[in-house]
Image (spheres, coloured by chain):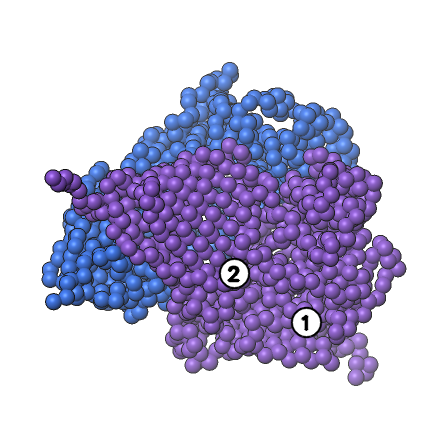
Amino acid sequence: MHHSSLKSSSSEGRGWPLGGHLCAVFGLFLLCFSSGLAAGMPAWLASAVASKSSGFEPEAKTLVLLDSRSLAYAADGTEVLVLRQAVLFRQPTDPFREGITGLSFDAKTSELRSANAWIVGADGKRTERLDGESFRQEALHSSQYFHDLEKSVYFTDLKKVAPGCILAWEYELRIPVGVFDEQQDFSSRVPVLRTVFEAKSAAGAGLLWHSGGSRIGAPMVLPDGEGYRWELGPRPAGNPGWFADFIAEPFFISVRSLNARNPLAPIRDWSVLSAWCAGQVDPLLVADAELRNRVAARVKDVNGRWDRIRSLATMVQHEISYYSDHRKGGILSGILPHPPSLVLRQGRGDCKDKAGLMVAMLRVLGEQAYCVMLNYDNPKAVSEEWPGLSTFDHVIVAIPADADPPPGWPVLEGGPAGRLVLLDVTDASSPLGTLPAVELGGAALVLAPQSGTLLRIPADIGGGSRLELRGEGRVDGDGVLRLKVVDTRQGGLGASRHWWRFTRRREELVRALEARVQAAMVGSSVAGVTVAWDETKVTDSLGYEVAAPGVLQTAGKLVLFSPCMLAGSPSLPAWGPGQEGWVRLDALVQEEELDLELPAGFVMETLPADWSATDVLMTGSLSYRIEGRRLLLRATRTQKGALLGRQEYDQLGRSLQKFESMRRRPLLLRRAPEL
Amino acid sequence: MLKLCKPPTAWIFGLLLLVICGRPARGEEPWVKAQSAELGAKVSSFEPDAPAEILNWRIDVNDRQFPEKRRFAEYVRYKVYDGERAGKLLKLSMETRMHDGYRVVEGSILARMTLPDGTVRLYGKEAVQERELVKNTVKRPGFIDSVFGATGVSVKEHFIPLGSLPSGAIVEVYIQQSMMPSRLYDLSLQRDRLPVRNLELHVKVATDEQSFTHQGLLVNSTLLHIENNEKANNLDITGRDLPSLREEPLAGDLSLHSAAFISTYTSRRMASDKHANGIRIQATTEKPWLVISTIENSWFEDNTFVSDKFKAKAAALAGSSTDRIEQARRIHDFVQEVFLRNEDRLQAGYFHDKHYGRGDERQLEALLEPGALVKNDDEYRYGVSDILRFEMSLLRSAGFQVEGLVLPNRMHLQFSPKHAAAAFLADQACAISIDGTWYLSNPCSGEPLPFGMLPAKNCGSVGLLARFNAQDFIDVPLPSPDKTQERNLGNFVLGEDGTLAGDCTLILSGYNAASLRKLMSGAAKDKQAELLKEATAQFHAGAEVEILSHGDLVDPNKPFELRYRLRIPNFATLLEDRMVLQPFVFHRRTSSPFSAKERSHPIIFPYLRQEYDKVSILLPEGYEVETREAPASSPGKALSYKVALGLDPKTHALLSVREFTLGLPHVSVAGYPVIKQWHESIALSDQYKIVIRKKSESVTVQGH
């Protein structure tokens, strides 16, 4: 097998001295010679090609015949990962074709040693071999908020792969082991016929492994006893990107080398891991004079413990721009923050920089604050039984709660550090007193020398959000409704709406409101929009006036009027085919109250009966009362915060539909006989 | 004077001169001292809640070295009113590109920030960070490149991270670039969420008038002023108080409503295989398109062939049909198949590039074989236009009079025949004359369309026939609404518990069918039913859907038909002895697309269309309809909405018919209130509710 070196085929070849040119000419001959020898296909590819007519997923446009990964640890503290894939492209048009050959890696620490590809003709015999020239490398983060050397390499000549042909490729990557486990994710958006993963230990060092999810069985031990091999049979395509709140079932294997160079090799306990991380991070969280002065100036006129903390949190959230710079720091760059004084001076940093700055500033105030690591948007990513760092990707802050923190705050309980208020200083839309919904339900590692441990953040921590909709007004005899509405949101919902408003123009708010109100009341118009934000109560209020014509519909001798028009109609997307995982449900209390004067000259024919229902995830109730000409309506819905499996999700869908159908019931009025 | 100086003195003087003159970068820096009033301003004077505004925006485009080089300089002076909100709007970055070591785009970026207290921070070269966005490891297969190493493509981003942005600050950024110029560029002169106080655009046009004709066009330019200095060959555009851009539904591309400058160069020289020595065509005031038409003609003609193989295939496709329209349709369908099979192997992009013209009769003939795929190599890649010329070759070989046609895109630009530039007619089609009538065909649009139907974006205006030394436009009207229909038919039974269940048929034609076919073309057959089920379930939120059958997803000449079974629990609301239900099952959730009170831009509808629904709901035994009224209809010619309700006395089924016609391609801002109100009245009717009531027990008393 021939591997062409990516390094020598690119920019390093330019500007060589004469000797270099001779080498290159010699290399060229060698290349021609070796290419001639390797005109066929390697054995692993031949076996994949032989499985082409397996009959598995015959309609799939793209089928992965083989997904093979081989990991070999070396005694020098590095590992070599060889990825081999063979894919049958049955049809030329498949949206998954483009990204399928992509591999991301850290160009700062890792070396892509080779990239080779083969195209096997539809007859299974004719093979064209392609090397580095058919691959391209791109920066992975193409935005101004990241500056790292994460890159993606991918095959560029997909157009050469005709229908019925097999594209196979092989990457060889050399990676320093560092403190992170090697984590191989096997989720795929196209069906896979065969999966092989092999991990070999450095001689005598040993390995530990952990499988994420229930779909991966136990491995077999390699003949030399120095590693493991997993083999998975045919598996259909997954679809992890169903919608934002869907969390796919984990499908990965983590492997850890027990090499003496790996400082985490002996760690089997979260507390020890926490202490080790705290030992790395805490010495960096030093406050210099400038930082101390800034803290003092910031809280000079602020009374009250939480007000001071809020003032500092707001400063970090709003005045430190997000900017992730991983160019320095070696293999620990993913966990070590930049010095807080530098972050403050430059006015920029990423999550660990901002959390580090906040902890340093709180310590200036005499607070004992901690950095907390978690997975930002996948509560299933971190497994309690596998103490390690690979699945964490975000850092927030924990502050010891006093005896009586404000109600509704995210207070984490049960750890040796006592009750802790959680705060995300990276997310400017989550002020003190809230936590982004995506961070709920997962595990969090509190970094502390003695009292750190892994705790699970309850999905309904703080009791969730509260939404109150109150309307007061009248309907006249011509069917014109005039209503004053106050829409108050507290907690996460309030904070996110406030942030939405904050980042947009007033005109955009009015247009969005017009669209929402029009969807409920055709032809309506909105006026008198007022807004208010109470940061201490994390409450956002929106007031407006609605005028809607034609809300009374004549039906024979009756007039119909549908009074539940303030809240939108919640519905859930259908659970997609082949989906395995969970859906995040945010805790919510919603109240809708309407005080409405009905038109003169009508009598009530039918008032919908009061209704209520309770199930495991949701309760709903509706009550209607008539006082003279006034209709008093109250609708409440409470849903629990949870991660829902398929059955619970379907049950919730049915409950919501029932609630909606009851909520939609109109009043029937009859014109009063004239005297 | 220098001659009098001794050499060392001259050297020193020369060096001094070099030092003074050799600092162009500093000399060119455009920084403007911030005035205290500017620094003290708290809100934008003409868009009070803008987080920032552009005080000065100057763009210099220098095309004097066109077509070798274009120099571009941009200076923007921002006033920050709200640092955090403005942070995401001020992007201080630029890209450079290299190809095999050759600088395609190079440049520099500098910035300066004046803090509210007057402190000035400079961000020079040392503050600029760069990172590689794209690096191609390609080594070209030539010997020289193999030995000396080609570096492939490299794209870098150069950016200045400012960190926190204090409210009140003034930020200035200055970007200079030089690049290989394209013939067409357009500059949007308005910004998203950022109003512009003062704008200056200075264009130095290429002076090589023998080779190129320049066309500079200002669009949506009521706020701009242009001065054409013909002597100096300069264009100077200025503007004041340009509002920030506003997003609105159905407003077309940004270029339709943003003030923009469009610059194009059109070649005056032709390189034609059939006119090998080159021909000079002179455009006239009356016929400004003569050159363009002739060049387009050469593109089509050079690569269109009449041969025995093409003739044989055309005859085979025609079969026994003697109908010329049917014969042309069969050729269109065959070429569309070839296109769809090869779509992702064809070079997209701009047509007017000789590189994508294969110019090889045998290569085009090879596509006549069943299942043939284009064979790209390092020299040539097949382009979409090659497939169009493949169609022309077949049509010509069948004896049709066929010509190339170039077309504007009405979603992108309002076309005017007065402004002659090839870039304004960037799309192509074939025009076939049959018995004196033009039939138009584009089998390469991506959306599988029937013969005679062009993509809607190319309709509603005119097309230029690609003729030698002639300027002939033909009308290309938008297909009438009946060509694009959505028909929903439903036979339902309403249960006593309010559940609606029954079988439905959806029939789509025209652009509706083409969009669906395009969407489904990426899915395997067994996934198509799943996708259709998912989409139908989403449309009827909360409903249970079973797909019974679906029609042809390939043949563009047939309407698409979907049959499905629907069950909607809680469809009717139960109220004691009554039920309330919505008879227009398929449009009961319709809301108006126009919710905003006011409108800034004209409405552009993508195409004209019709909807037709016919629904029968068998009511539960023992119920009678209490509602006597019908919802409002608004019949009309261009816009029409008609609904009818009735009760079948035999079957006791509630019958509803709904017809909707949109026959207007666009509506002006002045017409917005009318169209808004029309859509609202439709939504009210679509959401109409019917009350049915359980009959009271009737007792028959038999008399003696």
Q: What chain is the purple one?
A: B
Circle 2: element type: loop
Circle 1: element type: loop
Quarter residue B8 falls in:
bottom right
Q: What chain is the blue one?
A: A
Q: Nearer the viewer, residue B169 or B647?
A: B647
Determine if residue B476 is in view. Answer: yes
Question: Which numbered tag is attached to residue B100?
Answer: none
Q: Position of residue B232 (x, y in %)?
A: 72, 79
Question: Which numbered tag is attached to residue B663?
Answer: 2
Residue at the limit of the structure toward the right, as seen here: B277
Query: What residue do we see at 16% from left, 48% from top?
Result: A609
Q: How crowded is the residue under tag 2: few (<14 C-alpha within 10 Å), some, or many (20+)?
A: many
Q: Is residue A70 above or below residue A99?
A: above
> Which residue in the protein does label 1 denote?
B418
Q: Amino acid at mark 1?
A: Lys
Q: Nearer the viewer, residue A583 or A668?
A: A668
Determine if residue B120 is in view. Answer: no
